[in-house]
């Protein structure tokens, strides 16, 4: 905390998170700007949801909610789709969404924006085309969301095709 020469540019490797915490605690938010924006997003989400001092979590949450268009926002939306609690809260609170039309159906389903989802993908085909990239945990979360909301459970196209041709 007493080092007036914090790392610049942002470090790679294990020390990234620790040095981001130090920069925030020292009030040196300008140092966070030296991180690659897309790679900083998972660090901010981890810090916001971790056991760090309240000022660290608050700064991280504010930054996640204030992202502009670009790679950082895309990464945040992807984390939300994958089920990261802090990322999901950030996109829900701030109204952020991915620019990529291929990710949008999955994003809208994951964030439970049903009117927009139904208008974009009324039969669920777009969602099912793109959920193959999800982990087992991510798929389980989608199934849970579908059940909780009384919606059809998504099923990857390849699973359906395998059952039909198998």
Image: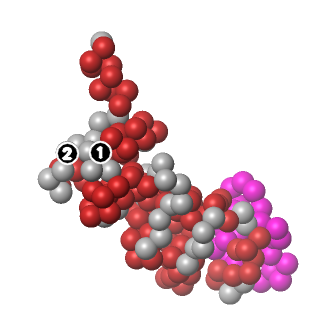
Residue 84 appears at what percent x and percent y? 43, 59
At x 54%, y 84%, the residue is 55
147 or 116: which is nearer to us?
Answer: 116
Q: Is residue 66 toward the left or the right of residue 149 in the image?
A: right
Whether residue 103 is visible here, answered yes or no, is yes
Q: Earlier in the sequence, mark 1 or mark 2?
A: 1
Magenta-span inclusion, residue 64: no
Locate the N terminus by quadrant: bottom right
Residue 85 appears at what percent x and percent y? 40, 63
Q: Is residue 3 above or below residue 47?
A: below
Q: Is residue 134 above or below residue 72?
A: above
Near mark 2 (Cα within 10 A), the count class, few <14, some 14-19 or many ≥20, is few
The CA span between labels 1 and 2 is 8 Å
Pick out the residue farthest to the top: 166
Q: Are marks 1 and 2 in contact (CB under 8 Å)?
A: yes
At x 53%, y 80%, the residue is 62
Q: Is residue 84 toward the left or the right of residue 20 in the image?
A: left
Residue 22 appears at what percent x and percent y? 68, 76
Q: Is residue 13 above or below residue 156?
A: below
At x 40%, y 76%, the residue is 93
Near mark 1 (Cα within 10 A), the count class, few <14, some 14-19 or many ≥20, is some
Secondary structure of the residue carrying tag 2 is loop
Q: Name the image quarter holding residue 12.
A: bottom right
Secondary structure of the residue carrying tag 1 is loop
9 or 110: which is nearer to us?
Answer: 110
Q: Identify the residue under disc 1.
A: 124
Q: Identify the residue under disc 2.
A: 152
- Residues in magenta? 1-23
């Amino acid at each position: 905390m007493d080092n007036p020469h914090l790392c610049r540019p942002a470090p790679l490797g294990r020390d990234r998170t620790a040095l981001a915490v130090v920069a925030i605690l020292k009030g040196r938010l300008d140092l966070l700007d030296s991180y690659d924006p897309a790679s900083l997003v998972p660090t901010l989400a981890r810090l916001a949801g971790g056991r760090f001092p309240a000022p660290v979590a608050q700064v991280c949450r504010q930054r996640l909610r204030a992202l502009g268009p670009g790679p950082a926002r895309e990464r945040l939306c992807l984390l939300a789709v994958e089920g990261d609690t802090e990322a999901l809260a950030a996109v829900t609170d701030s109204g952020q969404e991915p620019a990529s039309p291929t990710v949008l159906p999955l994003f809208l389903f994951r964030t439970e924006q049903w009117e927009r989802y139904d208008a974009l993908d009324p039969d669920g085909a777009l969602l099912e085309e793109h959920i193959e990239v999800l982990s087992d945990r991510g798929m389980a979360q989608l199934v849970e969301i579908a059940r909780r909301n009384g919606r059809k459970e998504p099923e990857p196209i390849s699973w359906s095709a395998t059952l039909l041709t198998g």
